Every structure is written in structure tokens, then in C-alpha cells.
Image (tube, rainbow, N blue to C red):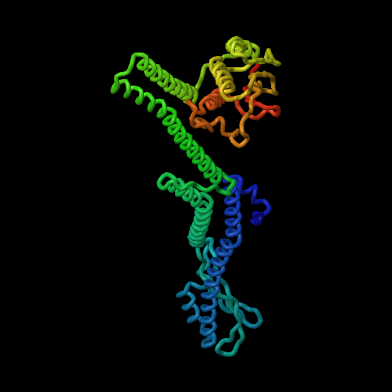
């Protein structure tokens, strides 16, 4: 079934890193805060200044109405002056020809401040048309600054609260929720054994969850390997141990002729040797797989090939096995442990002798350089391995023959040796027949 998810341009780039999401979130917050500052906050300050101005104008307009009413009722300016003194107002009155007929300016002072002034036309009680202008007492500069400071402080507080809430939502959505879900996934695994699902996210949190899923798969594989290990050891020890118990029971409960006793004792001894061989092989597997480091020395390829020829050549020739070594990069060097490499090829040789199935067994080793690696190819002329089980032959205790002793440890030991040397090992069938084992090891400068 095809995946019909809609892909938005740029989302792949964004999803790959959590830091990119956080940077984008910060940019969004900065842009929104700037918009809020330029629009909402500046509008807020403008409205407050406008309201303050409207209040001053409204008061001045009220005073102007009172002054007009006083002038309409009387031509005596004493009552007007009393009203102006009481409310700390200033006032100038002109007649229709523009001549000054009254002035009161006592509230004017030298302090810096703001005043509200209104100019109106009116009529005296005698019917004379006049024009007057009043102004309020000045509001001190510090009072205006304090008022504006209070308004700014309140507005900035609200702005910071909004930015904080927006950042909290972004962080909670981008970071906290995925981390909580990952923690829940981990708890479900170690409490209930529920396997974690892989995440479609490509950022650090998605990679963390996928790494956890990979780790769980590795743990599951190791548990299965341990189960196979226990089952294999149990099987390979149980059969000879049952025979040993049967023979010893007969020796203890029945009077047997000396020849029969020696026969039974020989069988017991042979079965014990089989168990010892299994235990030795298992110790070898643990020794190679559990140690952290092995002593390495720089060795030339020709020295390794000479060691293998000297170690196995004569013995294989006596057994009627054709053994050939071809070294095409004699001066190339690599860091290795000679004992481990001897064990590596010894296991391959023993495996071919036991399972190749060739009438006239031939074993070949080719050493050549591949870029910055040295390649060792080992193959025989046997029947090869079923392609279905070929990927599993390096697994510990894997075998298709449950009656075979020391099941499936040889090639697993070879894999551990290759890993300890920083190399890789693989297997494939030879087209003409036989199994080929390919070992790649890092090449070093001489």
C-alpha cells in the first residue's frame, strides 16, 4: 500500500533536527513579539496618551462652559476672577473689535508641563459679543513621566506574559510531549515487555526513539541467542552424559567380565572427552567474545601466509587435503594478533574438513589488497551451504544438525575475531561448488 501522506515543502529539512525547530520557534516568537510591540503595544500606549489628552480637554471644556455661563449672567468680572482663582485657571477676554477687556494669568508658572487651552465665543449679559480663551493649570512633567512609566510597565508585563506563554506552548509541544511519550514507551517495555514502535520523526527525539527501538531489537536478538546457547549446551551435554550414567550404572550394579568393564570405561572416557571438547570450545567462544582488547602487532601479509602454511600445510598434506595459499600483497601490513588469526583459519579449515563433503578436499587461501583493506578469501570445493541458512551461519550455536557436538561455535568465533580486529567477515557460495569465507581487515602503513 502506498503512503499517501501529504509532504509540505521544507518540512523534511525542518524535521531532521530539533535545533532547527527551536530556531524556527524562536524566530516565530520574535516576529510575533515584534508585531505585538509595533501594533498592539504601540496602539496601547497611543490610546493611553489619547485618553489622557481627552480627559484634560474634557475638563477644560467644562471650565469653558462655566465661564461662558458666568459671563452671560453678569458683566462684572469679579465673579469670574473668583471662579478662576478657585479652579487655578487662566483667562483672557476680548471684545468684538479684538480689544482686551479682561485678563487673569496667575496660574501660569515656569515649571515644564502641559496645559489644556480652549477658545470660545460668548455674549455678556448686556448683549455684547466677546471672545474668551481659558487654560488649565500646567500638569508637571514628572507627573506625566510617572503616568507614562506606569502604563509602559503594565504593557510590558502583559507582553512578557504573552511571550512566555507562547514559548511554553512551543517548548511543551516540540520537546516535552515527545520526551514524555518516549519515557512512557520505555516504561511499557521494561515493565510489560511491550516492544517500542519506530518513529517517523527525523529530528533528535525521533532518532533517539529509533535508537531505543534498535537497542531493543539487539537485546531481543541476544536473548534469543542466549536461549539457543542454553538449548544447544543442554542438548550436546545431555546425550553423552546420559550414556556415561548408563555405563557407570552397569559397572556399579552388574558383575561384568574384565574385557566388558574396559569397554565400558573406554566409552565413558570417550564421552567425557566429548563433553570436555564442548566445554573447551565454549570457553574459546567466551574468551574471544568477552575480552575488550587483544594485543596487536604490525605484521606483513607474507608473514601471515607463511605462518598458515607452516601451521597447517604439512598436517593437511598428510591427511590428503590439497592446501594452497596465494599472497598477492606480500609487503602490505596490518595490525593483528597472530594467535587469533591462526585460530580463525583453523576453525575454517576444521569446518571444511567436517562439512565440505568433497571426495578430494581442496582448500585455498587468497590474500590481496582492496583499497585500504587486506582481503583474505578462504574457500573449499565442497557442496557449499543452503542459501536460505547462509546468512545465519555466523550466529552462535546455529546448526541444522542437532546431533552434532559443539554446535555452531566455530564460525561465530571467527566473527568475533574479525570484529576484534576492526574487520568484517562474510560468506558466499562458490559458483563451481564450495563455500567462500571473506575476511576484510584494515591495512596500515608499513
Q: Residue at x 56, y 23 (%)?
A: 354
State which quarter of the image contains the N terminus: bottom right
Above-or-below relation of 30 to 363: below
Quarter where residue 438 is shown: top right
Residue furthest to the front:
257
Above-or-below relation of 81 to 180: below
Foreground residue among 40 and 409: 409
Res 428 seen here? yes
Foreground residue among 156 and 186: 186
Quarter where residue 344 is shown: top right
x, y (%) of residue 351?
56, 23
x, y (%) of residue 164?
50, 54
x, y (%) of residue 420?
54, 24
Foreground residue among 143 and 295: 295
State which quarter of the image contains the C terminus: top right
Res 145 seen here? no
Foreground residue among 406 and 300: 406
Q: Residue at x 62, y 29 (%)?
A: 426
Amino acid at each position: 500500500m502506498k503512503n499517501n501522506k501529504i509532504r509540505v515543502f521544507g518540512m523534511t529539512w525542518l524535521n531532521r533536527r530539533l535545533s532547527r525547530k527551536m530556531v524556527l520557534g524562536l524566530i516565530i516568537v520574535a516576529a510575533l513579539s515584534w508585531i505585538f510591540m509595533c501594533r498592539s503595544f504601540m496602539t496601547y500606549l497611543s490610546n493611553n496618551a489619547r485618553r489622557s489628552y481627552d480627559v484634560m480637554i474634557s475638563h477644560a471644556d467644562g471650565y469653558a462652559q462655566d465661564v461662558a455661563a458666568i459671563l452671560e449672567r453678569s458683566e462684572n468680572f469679579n465673579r469670574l476672577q473668583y471662579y478662576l482663582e478657585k479652579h487655578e485657571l487662566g483667562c483672557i477676554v476680548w471684545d468684538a473689535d479684538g480689544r482686551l477687556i479682561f485678563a487673569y494669568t496667575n496660574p501660569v508658572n515656569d515649571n515644564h508641563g502641559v496645559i489644556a487651552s480652549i477658545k470660545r465665543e460668548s455674549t455678556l449679559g448686556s448683549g455684547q459679543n466677546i471672545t474668551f480663551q481659558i487654560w488649565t493649570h500646567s500638569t508637571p512633567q514628572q507627573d506625566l513621566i510617572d503616568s507614562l512609566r506606569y502604563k509602559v510597565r503594565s504593557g510590558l508585563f502583559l507582553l512578557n506574559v504573552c511571550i512566555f506563554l507562547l514559548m511554553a506552548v512551543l517548548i511543551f509541544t516540540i520537546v516535552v510531549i515527545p520526551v514524555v511519550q518516549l519515557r512512557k514507551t520505555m516504561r511499557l517495555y521494561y515493565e510489560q515487555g511491550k516492544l517500542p514502535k519506530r518513529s517517523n520523526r527525523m529530528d533528535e527525539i525521533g532518532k533517539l526513539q529509533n535508537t531505543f527501538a534498535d537497542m531493543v531489537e539487539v537485546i531481543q536478538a541476544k536473548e534469543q541467542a542466549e536461549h539457543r546457547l542454553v538449548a544447544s549446551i543442554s542438548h550436546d551435554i545431555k546425550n553423552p552424559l546420559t550414556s556415561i550414567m548408563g555405563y557407570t550404572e552397569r559397572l556399579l550394579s552388574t558383575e561384568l567380565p574384565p574385557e566388558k568393564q574396559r569397554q565400558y570405561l573406554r566409552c565413558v572416557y570417550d564421552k567425557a572427552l566429548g563433553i570436555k571438547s564442548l566445554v573447551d570450545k565454549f570457553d574459546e567462544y567466551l574468551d574471544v567474545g568477552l575480552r575488550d582488547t587483544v594485543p596487536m602487532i604490525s605484521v606483513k601479509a607474507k608473514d601471515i601466509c607463511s605462518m598458515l602454511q607452516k601451521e597447517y600445510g604439512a598436517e593437511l598434506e598428510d591427511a590428503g587435503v590439497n592446501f594452497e595459499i596465494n599472497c598477492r600483497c606480500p609487503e602490505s601490513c596490518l595490525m593483528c594478533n597472530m594467535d587469533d588469526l591462526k585460530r580463525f583459519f583453523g576453525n575454517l579449515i576444521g569446518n571444511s574438513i567436517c562439512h565440505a563433503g568433497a571426495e578430494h578436499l581442496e582448500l585455498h587461501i587468497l590474500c590481496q589488497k582492496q583499497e585500504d583493506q587486506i582481503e583474505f578469501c578462504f574457500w573449499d570445493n565442497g557442496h557449499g551451504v543452503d542459501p536460505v541458512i547462509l546468512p545465519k551461519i555466523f550466529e552462535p550455536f546455529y546448526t541444522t544438525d542437532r546431533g552434532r557436538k559443539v554446535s555452531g561455535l566455530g564460525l561465530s568465533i571467527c566473527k568475533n575475531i574479525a570484529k576484534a580486529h576492526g574487520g568484517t567477515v562474510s560468506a558466499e557460495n562458490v559458483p563451481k561448488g564450495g563455500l567462500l569465507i571473506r575476511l576484510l581487515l584494515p591495512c596500515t602503513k608499513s
